[in-house]
Image (cartoon, grey):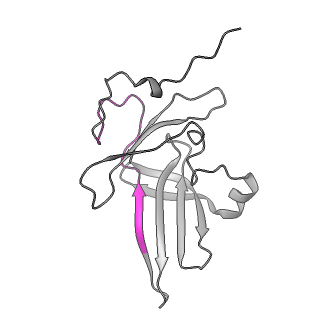
Amino acid sequence: MEALLAPISESGSRQIRRMRAQFPGETEPREVPITEENASNWLVTGRKLTPESLEGMTVSESTKVEVPAGKFDAKHVRVEGYNKQSRVDWFMADSVPGGIVKYTNTVTDDDGKSTESWSMLLIEHGDGSTESKLGVDLDAAPAASEVPAEPASE
């Protein structure tokens, strides 16, 4: 996955403006729809969790995680499926745009054997990228729909 993030706002947050993905088994990258409504809160399944809910899902406030982009001190958050046959784990680090360095899905079969069915790992990060891994022309002017509207002056 590859994301284009807006500059950091006055509140310290960043909106995702565009995302492309190419998953295992896919031959071509594809666009992931980002709406104005979910541009700010896509981090955790497209919803903004209450602080209490996030606290309840936190496995560890600080755990060491190594991914291709490096070693990170991350918050480990876990969601169990209702049937206890699936589990999603997030490893979140404030030091990277987007905040997630690792995201995994684990399934448990009827015999109790757990298998990581898929994962996403941060490969690299940074500001001012000059090359897209998934074929976006970063020098091209954004389409009109990608340019935020200027606030109306009074």
Residue depicted at 40% across the width and 66% down the height: 118
Q: Which residues are magenta?
A: 116-134
Q: Is residue 135 above or below residue 123?
A: above
Q: Is residue 122 magenta?
A: yes
Residue depicted at 50% across the width and 39% down the height: 97
Q: Residue furthest left?
A: 27
Q: Position of residue 57 (x, y in %)?
A: 66, 63
**Front-lying residue, 64 or 142:** 142
Q: Position of residue 147 (x, y in %)?
A: 48, 23
Q: Residue furthest top?
A: 154
**Front-lying residue, 59 or 39:** 39
Q: Position of residue 106 (x, y in %)?
A: 47, 72
Position of residue 34 in the picture relative to residue 21 (left or right)? right
Residue depicted at 53% across the width and 66% down the height: 88
Q: Is residue 3 above or below residue 102?
A: above
> Quarter holding the C terminus?
top right
Q: Is residue 6 magenta?
A: no
**Front-lying residue, 117 or 47:** 47
